[in-house]
């Protein structure tokens, strides 16, 4: 689970007062949206929590500059369905608004329909049901070349028989720009991706990262409003990938374009996106900002898919106001935050982030406190992962920062494990 | 030093093993392919038979300066040779060889040999001229004898290019009524070219379809493409005869449908030849193109269209150029194979559609003129190699892909 590491690293760096402020804001927000449906809450879900601010400062910046993108929808999927074989739906009832200027990521496991969704938007697949609108008019049956949507393919799809400059001039020639303008635009685009020296090379003579940048330049050179990227960094090594993530992010910000980005790498999604749509089985399970998604997954799949997660199974014993009591299969009673529960007696999965579990907390600070035993220790530099057996489970992972004053644990040592009600989310299972 | 020795020893055993592995194939190719072809090609310029059959003449004629008629010694030498030939029954061979260059000479040689066998003594010159003034009283035959009794000859190669030596040893054009081979070479190239173009025009769309269909369907189609490979060339050609002949299936069908009133000639002409050859060559053009297309990712076309290119424009600018190596391979294959066609033109073509191989076969099987057969075969080989070199210059052979 390399994916969540950058995220947690930052979370651990966050100063305490920041955490506190975030926590208060978050409590306030929970109160506000109590009973508000997920779809309506969407416009609220700008990053606000401590985690959110820790995720990236640039998100804050964007919030300040006038709620960019909240205005109108650039793309609208209306009840879109897609089936390839006439039997199974690869995309089931997709309704999605993509805002002008936002960086939206489609995140999901393999085969969940992300590429299919992107292909329908690009025009290479036709929905079997529903409409897709671009700028308010339907493009459901418009051929791809008329849509003016830039696209970056996973394998780059640079034309191998053309030089870099010829690759870039293709969309401009099609649009009948004159020679001088084509030259000027090619130069500008190549400067933008810092490849001016490579104009006369063939794609085969470029490294993976350079090819990637050419593909990016080619998708942007004709100044489309909307750019689609299907796992554009999948073929790069980790370091280059992280570098390119930042470059793409910067391009997005400086050009003011709308980006729809597909990935199955959650850390990539978390670092880059304004909003993330989590796909599984052709359904969007949650559409929210990265922090919202991490902090407040609205169902078991999202909780499981984004970041690391401890799970406990039980059923709702009692619902009261803002909390609920869940009776675990092993008999323990846990105070949890009901996120989507069907009512008393319904089965739920409790989702607990490892960094929210505390070992040997001060008495009275945690409504949930249980006796357990340390099973295993995994040292990871800045923190140690402690595997604890408690509450009938033997695989509760607790992240303990390796800072001063934190006691060292030994396997077999009895501990007490506790967590707050808000950090324990009860999700229908 | 010991290290070097050890290395050499280790290398040697590995080299020996490698050698042992390729030796059988190498021997096979040398014995069954390289050596016969080399010998055959050598036959185009090496023909010692005449000199061997006329040993005395070969020596005596060296002193003749080529002006006027040779003197008595040369006639006497020829007479001695012909006497021996009459006994050894090689006079026919001598006559046949001289007949290549002067038609009608064969019977005259035989008659002279019979005459000489009865002569007891000279002077032979007079006797020869008396026997046949038109051949022994003229310098022409002596020019031929002087030139062709040497073991190496340029005659066959020149004749294959419609040229010959005149009396003074200059190379001149063969008289137009006998000059046929240049025409036949051009015809061979032209038919091969037509076949290549037609297979390309017909095959390219099929290859595209094969490469873009899902595997289950494309496999079925592929079998159909390959069916011709499973039947013998002769059977396929005969099938075309059945279809195309004047009372054949196609004529019957057209008349039955009322499209035609009179039967038309579909066979024994250029059209029939090119048609049948195109059919036979189709898989050879399709397969290399197909295998190259198979490697072209569909994302290129998608990328082109997402960049704003219409379907045809994108195809032409993006897809087609990437298939050129396959086209090159397929066309080169078909063109070179077509150059050597023999059976199909022989069965489906008319007299004006016979290609160079027909004449190679004719000279080998019927005329027993190995020199001509070798010269024509050698020139065909040279032509193919030249084509290959030109293609390599223009396109680059490394650009040819078979998959
Ligand atoms: N052309 C096609 N024909 C038939 N089925 C297809 C086709 N393309 C995709 N599918 C099926 O549709 C489902 C969703 O595929 P899709 O490519 O959208 O997944 P994805 O989310 O992009 O996955 P990945 O992360 O692996 O790229 C898969 O089960 C796949 O098998
Ligand atoms: Mg995909």
Image: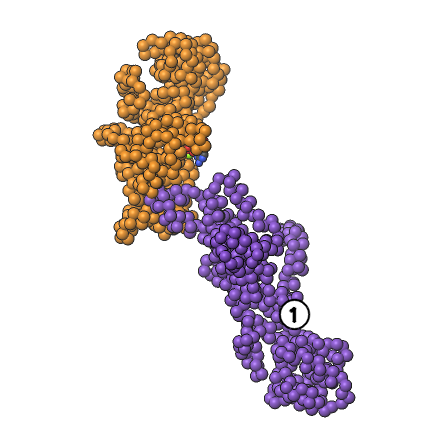
Chain A rendering hue: orange
Q: Residue at point 53% right, 45% down? A: B222
Numbered-mark total: 1
Q: Nearer the viewer, residue B240 or A195?
A: B240
Spot occupied by residue A342 in the image (x, y as percentages of width and height):
38, 13
What is the residue that sits farthest to the left in this orientation? A66
Quick one: SS at disc 1?
loop
Q: For residue B145, what is the image quadrant?
A: bottom right
For ligand 2, the image quadrant comes to: top left
Residue A27 visible in image: no
Answer yes or no: is residue B310 visible: yes
Chain letter for the purple part: B
Q: Residue at x 49, y 56 (%)?
A: B260
Q: Which residue is painted at 49% across and 45% down in the image?
A: B210
Q: Looking at the picture, does residue A170 appear above or below residue A275?
A: below
Q: Looking at the image, which is closer to me, B235 or B377?
A: B235
Name the image quarter holding residue B103: bottom right
Instruction: Name the residue nearer the viewer: A163 or A59.
Output: A163
Chain letter of mark 1 equals B
Considering only vertical position in the picture, is B76 above or below A267? below
From the viewer's perspective, is A75 left or right of B172? left
- Does B7 appear above or below A229? below
- Residue B206 relative to residue B301: left or right: right
Image height check: is B9 above or below A225?
below
Location of residue A394 in the rendering, given as x and y in whole percent from the top left corner: 48, 16
* Label 1 Cα neighbours within 10 Å, binned few <14 / some 14-19 / many ≥20: few
Residue at mark 1: C-beta within 8 A of ligand 1? no
Residue at 76%, 87% (x, y): give it.
B119
Q: Return the x and y of residue B369 as percentages of the image width and height.
A: 65, 70
Residue A338 percent across, percent down from the top left: 36, 14
In the picture of the structure, the residue carrying the numbered disc 1 is: B367
- Residue A193 appears in which quarter of the rendering? top left
């Amino acid at each position: 689970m390399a994916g969540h590491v950058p995220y947690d690293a930052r979370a651990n760096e966050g100063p305490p007062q920041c955490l506190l402020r975030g926590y208060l804001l978050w409590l306030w927000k929970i109160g506000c949206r109590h009973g508000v449906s997920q779809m309506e809450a969407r416009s609220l879900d700008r990053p606000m929590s401590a985690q959110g601010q820790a995720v990236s400062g640039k998100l804050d910046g964007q919030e300040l500059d006038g709620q960019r993108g909240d205005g109108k929808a650039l793309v609208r999927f209306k009840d879109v369905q897609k089936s390839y074989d006439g039997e199974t739906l690869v995309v089931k009832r997709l309704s999605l608004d993509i805002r002008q200027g936002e960086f939206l990521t489609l995140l999901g496991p393999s085969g969940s329909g992300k590429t299919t969704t992107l292909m329908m938007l690009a025009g290479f697949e036709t929905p079997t049901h529903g409409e897709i609108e671009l700028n308010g008019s339907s493009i459901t049956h418009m051929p791809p070349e008329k849509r003016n949507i830039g696209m970056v393919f996973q394998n780059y799809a640079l034309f191998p028989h053309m030089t870099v400059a010829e690759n870039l001039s293709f969309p401009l020639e099609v649009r009948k720009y004159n020679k001088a303008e084509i030259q000027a635009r090619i130069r500008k685009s190549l400067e933008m991706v810092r490849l001016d020296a490579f104009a006369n090379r063939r794609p085969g003579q470029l490294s993976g990262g350079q090819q990637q940048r050419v593909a990016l330049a080619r998708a942007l050179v004709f100044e489309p409003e909307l750019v689609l990227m299907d796992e554009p960094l999948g073929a790069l090594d980790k370091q280059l990938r992280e570098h390119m993530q930042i470059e793409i992010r910067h391009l997005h910000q400086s050009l003011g374009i709308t980006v729809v980005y597909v990935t199955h790498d959650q850390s990539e999604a978390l670092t880059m996106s304004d909003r993330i749509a989590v796909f599984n089985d052709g359904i969007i399970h949650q559409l929210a900002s990265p922090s919202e998604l991490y902090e407040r997954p609205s169902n078991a799949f999202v909780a499981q898919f984004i970041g690391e997660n401890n799970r406990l199974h039980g059923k709702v014993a009692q619902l009261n106001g803002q909390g609920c009591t869940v009776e675990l299969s092993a008999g323990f009673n846990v105070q949890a935050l009901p996120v989507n529960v069907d009512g008393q007696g319904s089965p739920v999965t409790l989702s607990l982030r490892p960094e929210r579990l505390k070992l040997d907390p001060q008495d009275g600070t945690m409504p949930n406190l249980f006796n357990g035993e340390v099973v295993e220790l995994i040292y990871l530099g800045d923190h140690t992962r402690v595997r604890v057996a408690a509450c009938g489970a033997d695989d509760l992972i607790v992240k303990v920062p390796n800072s001063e004053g934190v006691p060292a644990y030994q396997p077999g040592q009895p501990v007490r494990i506790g967590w707050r009600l808000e950090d324990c989310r009860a999700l229908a299972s | 030093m010991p290290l070097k020795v050890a290395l050499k020893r280790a290398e040697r055993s590995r080299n020996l093993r490698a050698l042992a592995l390729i030796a059988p194939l190498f021997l096979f190719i040398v014995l069954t392919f390289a050596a016969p072809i080399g010998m055959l090609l050598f036959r185009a310029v090496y023909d010692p038979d005449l000199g061997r059959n006329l040993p005395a003449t070969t020596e005596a004629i060296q002193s003749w300066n080529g002006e006027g008629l040779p003197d008595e010694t040369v006639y006497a030498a020829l007479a001695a040779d012909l006497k021996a030939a009459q006994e050894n029954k090689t006079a026919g061979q001598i006559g046949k060889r001289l007949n290549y260059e002067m038609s009608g000479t064969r019977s005259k040689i035989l008659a002279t040999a019979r005459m000489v066998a009865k002569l007891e003594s000279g002077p032979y010159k007079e006797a020869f001229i008396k026997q046949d003034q038109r051949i022994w009283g003229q310098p022409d035959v002596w020019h031929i004898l002087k030139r062709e009794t040497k073991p190496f000859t340029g005659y066959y190669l020149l004749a294959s290019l419609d040229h010959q030596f005149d009396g003074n040893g200059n190379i001149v054009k063969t008289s137009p009524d006998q000059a046929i081979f240049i025409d036949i070479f051009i015809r061979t190239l032209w038919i091969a070219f037509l076949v290549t173009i037609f297979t390309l025009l017909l095959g390219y769309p099929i290859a595209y379809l094969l490469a873009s269909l899902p595997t289950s369907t494309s496999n079925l189609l592929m079998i159909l493409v390959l069916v011709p490979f499973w039947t013998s060339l002769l059977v396929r050609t005969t099938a075309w005869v059945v279809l195309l002949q004047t009372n054949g299936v196609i004529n019957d069908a057209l008349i039955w449908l009322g499209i035609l009133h009179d039967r038309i000639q579909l066979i024994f002409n250029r059209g029939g030849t090119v048609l049948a050859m195109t059919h036979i060559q189709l898989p050879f053009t399709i397969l290399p193109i197909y295998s190259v297309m198979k490697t072209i990712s569909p994302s290129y076309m998608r990328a082109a269209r997402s960049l704003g290119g219409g379907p045809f424009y994108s195809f032409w600018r993006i897809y087609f150029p990437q298939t050129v190596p396959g086209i090159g391979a397929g066309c080169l294959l078909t063109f070179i194979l077509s150059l050597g066609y023999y059976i199909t033109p022989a069965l489906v073509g008319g007299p004006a559609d016979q290609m160079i191989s027909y004449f190679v076969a004719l000279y080998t099987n019927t005329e027993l003129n190995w020199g001509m057969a070798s010269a024509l075969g050698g020139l065909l080989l040279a032509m193919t190699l030249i084509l290959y070199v030109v293609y390599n210059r223009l396109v680059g052979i490394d650009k040819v892909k078979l998959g």
